[in-house]
Amino acid sequence: QLWQASGFEVQFLSERQSGRNAAVADAVLEAVSQADLVHFLCHGSFDPRAPERSGLHLRDGQLLTLERLTLHSQTIPADLVVLAACRSGVTGPGDLSGEWLSIAGALVRAGARRVVATLWDVSYPLSVALSRTLYSAYLDHGLPAAEALAQAMRRLLSEGRAAAAGQVSHPALQDGQSGMEPRLRRVLASPLF
């Protein structure tokens, strides 16, 4: 809804839809070939032994692979692609040119100007909360994507610290989650963030 309110034409593809709104590889490639802003909320995987087989998990077990993204004949004109997908920015350890071997790197090679990706597994409630703040700053307030992302991350950390102190709720505690993940607890306790 935020995108539509900002004047974007929205095409919503889902693993739960059928027909032209089904999140299958051909439909996804067609959609990203026409979009200025793309948001993936799905599973991602990275295979360090065969990076070309890494990719985004779509409907009916389809995997939109790095290889398919790279060989796609049309340019991806998006100004911003957000990969709220597990390990979508991961590359092999020790790769000097590793960023090019990730899902994010494949999208950049295909023409996307900016890509936000993850290096770890993502939590659905945290991803949605981060995305809302990111898009509000990016679309409504006109911040550059990197600044909008930094602002969204700082807000989630601030809210997380308040939640850890019992002052407010936090997305990490939603959807039946009984407590914050240990990694999140370490981040919230760190003076570096």
Image (spheres, helix red, strand yellow):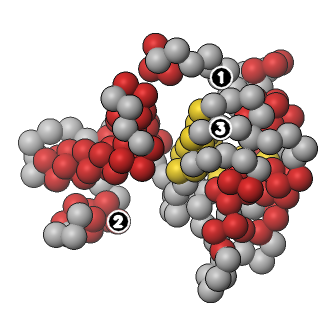
Q: Which residue is mark 2?
A: 183
- The x, y position of residue 75, in whole percent, is 80, 42
Q: Secondary structure at mark 1?
A: loop
Residue 173 visible? The answer is no
Amino acid beneath label 1: Phe
* Numbered label attached to residue 78: 3
Image: 47 above or below 106: below
Amino acid beneath label 3: Ala
Report whether 97 appears left or right of 22.
left
Q: Secondary structure at mark 3?
A: loop
- The x, y position of residue 52, in whole percent, is 82, 65
Mark 2 or 3: the one toward you: 3
- The x, y position of residue 130, in whole percent, is 38, 41
- The x, y position of residue 182, in whole percent, is 32, 65
Q: Is the Cβ of the residue at disc 1 closer than 8 Å to that at disc 2?
A: no
Q: Residues within 10 Å of mark 3 (few under 14, many from 20)?
A: many
Q: Residues within 10 Å of mark 2 (few under 14, many from 20)?
A: few
Q: CA distance from mark 1 to mark 3?
A: 16 Å
Image: 10 above or below 145: above
Q: Which residue is mark 1?
A: 12
Mark 1 or 3, nearer chain start: 1
Q: Is the Cβ of the residue at disc 1 closer than 8 Å to that at disc 3?
A: no
| Towards the viewer: 163 or 64 | 64
Amino acid beneath label 2: Arg
Residue at 81% in and 62% down: 53
| Picture quadrant where residue 102 is located | bottom right
* Numbered label attached to residue 107: none
Image: 53 above or below 68: below
Q: Secondary structure at mark 2?
A: helix
